[in-house]
Amino acid sequence: MIDGFVFPYKDLKGIYLIPLLTAGCVFWRNMPLQLIIASLITWLWYFFPPYVSQHFVQILLQWLTNVLAVIAISTLIKLYLAEKDHTLELTVALAKSLDSRDPHTACHSENVAHYAVLIAKELGLPKRICQQVYLGGLLHDIGKIGVPESILTKPGRLTKEEYEVIKQHPSIGFEMVKHIPAFQKRGILDMILYHHERYDGTGYPKGLSGGDIPLFARIMAVADCFDAITSTRVYRKEAELAVACTEIERNKGEQFDPIIVDAFLRMIEQTGPEILRTYRK
């Protein structure tokens, strides 16, 4: 109708691509419905001028083209979702391989991931970003795979030399996963490499400060510290929620970004002690 009457001298075939794209994106799970929509669009295409006189073979070829276009779009969506699932499975497997080395830090990565997401939500970050934060939380300590167990599980105070070894784990983790495409554009590498940077610039490995520290890493720093304080370690017992909050607030502006700390405290005020019963393993 548009082609034949409103714009009689123009070929507006491209306008029919809109419902094709919509069908592929919205109904990517439903193949029969995709075929019906492609058939309907083909019928509309040749029902109105100037295409009503087209040969049957041309109509059939156009129908096949429309069907293939819808299927191609839905296939791309399925491949994208499959890649996301594989990325999550890989991330969880890597996190579990790390946490299994020390029973005192079992589920630490998962706990940190959950806390980081709660902080991100309190900051108003969109769902897509929160999903990236979750993956980063699972992987933030992956570099500890390269740290000897004798250091990770040492019950006493670390020597200066041992602490220097521990400080290498962000760089080790970064080098381990930096070539994985799924991690390169989601801020995950930043969370692995910079989660031990301090807001005042005295952290490691780069000594970044303030806003130079990526946002995701600043979120991860608070979540990591919170789980460390409220969980049992080989060298001490867990602390109460109030103690953890006091410690984090005390380091506001020094170790942690004040904005992140404020968001964390608001989140704790809403959840209360239930947060530990829900997420702490």
Image (cartoon, helix red, strand yellow):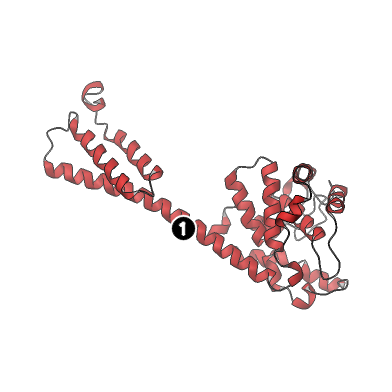
**Callout 1 crowding tier (Cα within 10 Å): few <14, some 14–19, many ≥20:** few
Q: Position of residue 133 (x, y in %)?
A: 64, 52
Q: Which image quadrant is residue 232 in?
A: bottom right
Residue closer to the observer: 22 or 259: 22
Q: Position of residue 94 (x, y in %)?
A: 61, 67
Which residue occupies 51% across, 58% down? 85
Q: Is residue 21 left or right of residue 174?
A: left
Q: For mark 1, what is the residue?
A: 82
Q: Position of residue 20 (x, y in %)?
A: 32, 40
Q: Which image quadrant is residue 58 in?
A: top left
Q: How many marks?
A: 1
Q: Which image quadrant is residue 196 in?
A: bottom right
Which residue occupies 43% across, 56% down? 79
Q: Position of residue 3 (x, y in %)?
A: 24, 27
Quarter that holds the N terminus = top left
- Residue that protrudes farthest toward the top in the picture: 6
Residue closer to the observer: 202 or 162: 162
Residue closer to the observer: 15 or 247: 247
Where disc 1 sits, the SS reads helix
Quarter that holds the C terminus = bottom right
Q: Is residue 44 left or right of residue 224?
A: left
What amino acid type should be assigned to the residue bearing mark 1? Ala
Residue 256 visible in the picture: yes
Q: Is residue 16 left or right of residue 4?
A: right
